[in-house]
Amino acid sequence: MGVFDGLPGLDAAFRETYPKADVQHCIVHKVRSTFPKIRIQHKTEVIEDLKTIYTAADHELALAAFDTVKAKWGKLYPKEMQSWEEQLSTLLTFYKYPVLIKEAIYTSNPIERMNKEIRKRLKPMNSLTNMDAAEKIIYLDVIDYNERFSERVIRGFGDLEVKKKLNEMFEARYPVQETEEK
């Protein structure tokens, strides 16, 4: 699964490389991109209504919640509701996966956190001698990040049932081809 923030072309490139993988668009980014387009008097209510979509108990209830939100806000915010509808399949991909890992896969925020740390490290260095110097700093930061978190198990991924389900999903998409014995 690839989790993307909506940057144009990124998910298409991912699908070209991994055609059997799922794409999840980041719910947090979608809500954030919708927020500025909502009038001030409706912001809290619209955001709360959108939350009913991605916190629903299952995929069917999420679709029903979207229908409710669209019926309520579609006339006032037709472009925003159309945008949600167009991306709904990739915004709700996480429902195919075990519920225990939902919070880890419905947003790209952990990746962005790492990027923020890298920017924070590079910012005080007003001028780097060249691109190689910046790449070395980034490389060393990523190595350090990986070492710090290499033993950490993301919430839900340590569960045996989750591991079993993910393994089943992987094997269904990428079956082991048995070699013919001669």
Image (spheres, rainbow, N blue to C red):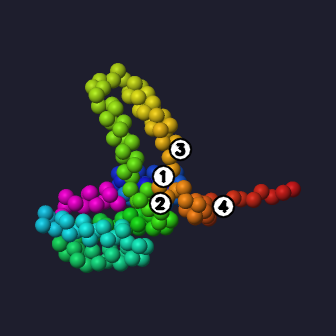
The magenta region covers: 27-38
Residue beneath the point at 43% across and 27% down: 136
Vertical placement of residue 55 versus 181, above or below: below
- Amino acid of disc 4: Pro
Q: Secondary structure at mark 2?
A: helix
Q: Earlier in the sequence, mark 2 or mark 3?
A: 2
Residue tagged by mark 4? 175
Vertical placement of residue 54 versus 113, above or below: below
Looking at the magenta stretch, what is its main secondary structure?
A: helix
Q: Are marks 1 and 2 in contact (CB under 8 Å)?
A: yes
Residue beneath the point at 35% across and 38% down: 117
Front disc: 2 or 3: 3
* Position in image of residue 27 (x %, y %): 35, 60
Q: CA distance from mark 2 to mark 3?
A: 17 Å
Q: Earlier in the sequence, mark 4 or mark 1?
A: 1
Vertical placement of residue 121 versus 25, above or below: above
